[in-house]
Image (tube, rainbow, N blue to C red):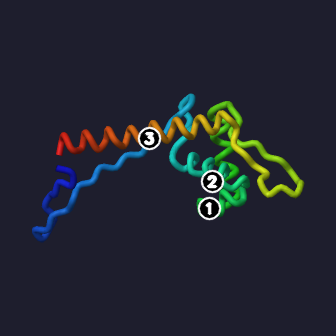
Amino acid sequence: MTGMKRKRRGGQMASLVPRVKVWLEAGGRYAVGLGISEILQAVDRTGSIKQAANEVGKSYRHVWERVKEAEAALGIGLVETRIGGKDTRRSCLTADARRLVAAFLTFRRRMMEVLNEEFDRCF
């Protein structure tokens, strides 16, 4: 019975909806979550840190710092960059980054399925 209702003031009912955030830590440090996975996917699509920042609605500095923080926490490179040249695709994901994003999104999707299954069972 997804969407169980509970009483509010004034006799109206509010639908309950489960929410959860999923992230991965390495050595007690935040490493990967939905935000960095969206950033990495945008870099992969656009081939540019700048364009990825525009796509996710963040500053270039914020995006670059998030990538560097994730790389430091994980101890691996996630984005390779090339300086100069005529090519507009100056940044690309490493093979490790592609595997990480795919695995994280699969894991997160399954966690959301389990959340909804348990919510339906309990409520």
Q: Amino acid at mark 1?
A: Glu
Q: Is residue 87 above or below residue 111?
A: below
Give the labeled residue for mark 3. 108
The picture quadrant where one finds residue 31 is top right
Q: Amino acid at mark 2?
A: Ala
| Element class at badge 1 | helix
Name the mark on residue 42. 2
Q: Residues within 10 Å of mark 1 (few under 14, many from 20)?
A: some
Taking the spot 15% from the left edge, 57% from the top edge, the residue there is 6
Q: Is residue 120 above or below residue 42?
A: above
Of all residues, the one furthest to the top in this rendering is: 27
Q: CA distance from mark 3 to mark 1?
A: 22 Å
Taking the spot 38% from the left edge, 39% from the top edge, the residue there is 111
Name the mark on residue 55. 1
* Among the two numbered marks 1 and 2 on one chain, the one whose residue lies closer to the N terminus: 2
Cβ atoms under marks 1 and 2 closer than 8 Å: yes
* Among the two numbered marks 2 and 3 on one chain, the one whose residue lies closer to the N terminus: 2
Name the mark on residue 25. none
Taking the spot 64% from the left edge, 38% from the top edge, the residue there is 97
Q: Residues within 10 Å of mark 3 (few under 14, many from 20)?
A: some
Give the image location of residue 100, x and y in percent.
58, 36
Taking the image as shown, residue 20 lies to the left or right of residue 23, namely left
Taking the image as shown, residue 91 lies to the left or right of residue 10, namely right
Q: CA distance from mark 1 to mark 2?
A: 7 Å
* Among the two numbered marks 3 and 1 on one chain, the one whose residue lies closer to the N terminus: 1
The picture quadrant where one finds residue 61 is bottom right
The picture quadrant where one finds residue 121 is top left
Q: CA distance from mark 2 to mark 3?
A: 18 Å
Q: Amino acid at mark 3?
A: Arg
Q: Residue 11 versus residue 122: which sits nearer the camera? A: 122
Of all residues, the one furthest to the right in this rendering is: 85
